[in-house]
Image (spheres, rainbow, N blue to C red):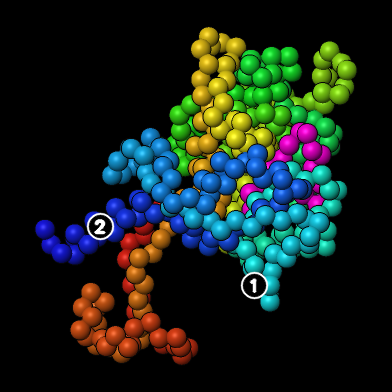
């Protein structure tokens, strides 16, 4: 076996074992009280861990067994009341932002909708979670409207489904939805969010997406029998629901033109320890099954924080073409000091070459 081919194979295998974010590891988590973070301790461990296994039945190469994923995020927990700064000296102070449900109406002068948009414009990634138990702050509503993501005007609305719910925890209210992982019909699109098992969405807030933006997508829709309503309305039927069925998005996402990513999860509770290893039972199944919430949360956060779905360039070289017919495959014709100069002049003839893109 040729040495260069062996090196390439080893690098490919190494890429499967490492999926560190291409944006950085600094993650700011916003929550009301620091004591609340204990409810999500397994999720934090996943984000901070090294060599966390993620089952990948849809892998296109090498193997369909579990992959060891090095995540290694450095988490900082703050309350909006402390006015945490997203920027320092004109640069991002954090690479990613995770927002848990907040009881505040506004998030303060350090977290206005414009500042959050500036964070996205500076290639920062945001994972936003909602909950029907906590009315969405005005700041978050304004941010979502800027991105053409809409919530019900009724701040107490949630999604229910009388056919796809957990009979163990919501036998009366039917507000813990049970859905399967998303499946895409196009075979040429890799499904980063697919998996096995059932995902539980307790007390979810539904979103609808505008039709004008090609940057928006619903990662996971509600079942066709679901609808959104206010449980405080004591009526037997809902005449004018906010949205129904697949109109409701449980998880929405946007990738901006600068590749920054923004994801909305309609149920923050699905990230809690309780639902990571819970057993649920749907009305049409006699046997309980374990939720796939932990695996889905890992996939969703990996995409949002640019660990998945990113093209990686292994080698990029350029130099001034002085008419010697130099090929970058033969480095002996050009001194190493002449590669990748910092300055070119207008109308210079430049030769550029790069290794193949490696998807991660």
Residue 115 lies, in percent from the top left, at 75, 63
Dividing the picture into quadrants, the one containing residue 344 is bottom left
Task: Out of 67 and 180, give the one closest to the viewer.
Answer: 67
Residue 130 lies, in percent from the top left, at 72, 40
**Magenta span of residues:** 126-140
For the residue labelled by badge 2, is the local secondary structure a helix, a strand or a loop? helix
x 38%, y 35%: residue: 57
Q: Is residue 127 magenta?
A: yes
x 36%, y 72%: residue: 316
x 44%, y 51%: residue: 50
Number of other residues with Cα within 10 Å of mark 1, as a class: few under 14, some 14 to 19, many 20 or more:
few
Task: Out of 358 and 34, give the one closest to the viewer.
Answer: 34
Residue that label 1 marks: 91
Residue 251 lies, in percent from the top left, at 62, 38
Task: Out of 102 and 229, give the one closest to the viewer.
Answer: 102
For the residue labelled by badge 1, is the local secondary structure a helix, a strand or a loop? strand
Q: Quadrant of the N terminus?
A: bottom left
Dividing the picture into quadrants, the one containing residue 355 is bottom left
Residue that label 2 marks: 10
Whether residue 147 is visible here, answered yes or no, is no
Whether residue 5 is visible here, answered yes or no, is yes
For marks 2 and 1, the one nearer the N-term is 2
x 46%, y 33%: residue: 195
Task: Give the vertical position of 89 relative to 105 (above or below).
Answer: below
Left or right: where 140 falls relative to 123: right
Q: Residue furthest right?
A: 234
Q: Is residue 37 magenta?
A: no
Q: In 3D space, how far apart are the residues under numbered discs 2 and 1 (Cα atoms)?
A: 36 Å
Task: Give the vertical position of 134 relative to 127 (above or below).
Answer: above
Left or right: where 130 falls relative to 350: right
């Amino acid at each position: 076996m040729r040495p260069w081919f062996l090196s390439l194979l080893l690098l490919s295998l190494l890429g499967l074992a490492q999926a560190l974010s291409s944006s950085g590891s600094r993650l700011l988590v916003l929550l009301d009280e620091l004591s609340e973070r204990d409810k999500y301790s397994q999720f934090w461990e996943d984000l901070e861990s090294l060599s966390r296994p993620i089952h990948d039945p849809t892998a296109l190469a090498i193997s369909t067994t579990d992959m060891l994923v090095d995540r290694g995020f450095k988490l900082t927990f703050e309350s909006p009341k402390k006015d945490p700064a997203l920027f320092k000296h004109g640069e991002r102070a954090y690479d990613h932002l995770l927002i848990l449900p907040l009881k505040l109406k506004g998030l303060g002068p350090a977290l206005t909708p414009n500042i959050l948009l500036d964070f996205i414009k500076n290639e920062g990634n945001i994972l936003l979670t909602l909950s029907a138990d906590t009315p969405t702050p005005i700041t978050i509503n304004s941010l979502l409207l800027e991105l053409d993501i809409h919530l019900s005007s009724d701040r107490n609305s949630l999604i229910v489904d009388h056919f796809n719910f957990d009979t163990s925890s919501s036998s009366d209210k039917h507000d813990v939805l049970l859905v399967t992982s998303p499946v895409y019909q196009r075979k040429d699109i890799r499904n980063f969010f697919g998996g096995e098992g059932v995902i539980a969405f307790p007390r979810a807030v539904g979103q609808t997406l505008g039709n004008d933006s090609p940057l928006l997508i619903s990662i996971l829709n509600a079942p066709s029998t679901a609808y959104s309503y206010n449980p405080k309305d004591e009526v037997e039927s809902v005449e004018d629901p906010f949205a129904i069925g697949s109109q409701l998005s449980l998880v929405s996402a946007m990738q901006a033109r600068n590749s920054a990513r923004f994801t909305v999860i309609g149920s923050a509770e699905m990230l809690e320890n309780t639902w990571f290893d819970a057993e649920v039972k749907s009305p049409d199944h006699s046997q309980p099954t374990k939720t796939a919430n932990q695996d889905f949360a890992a996939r969703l956060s990996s995409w949002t924080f640019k660990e998945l779905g990113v093209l990686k360039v292994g080698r990029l070289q350029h130099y001034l073409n002085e008419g010697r017919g130099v090929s970058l495959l033969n480095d002996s014709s050009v001194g190493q000091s002449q590669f990748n100069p910092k300055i070119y002049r207008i109308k210079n003839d430049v030769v550029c070459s790069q290794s193949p893109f490696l998807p991660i």
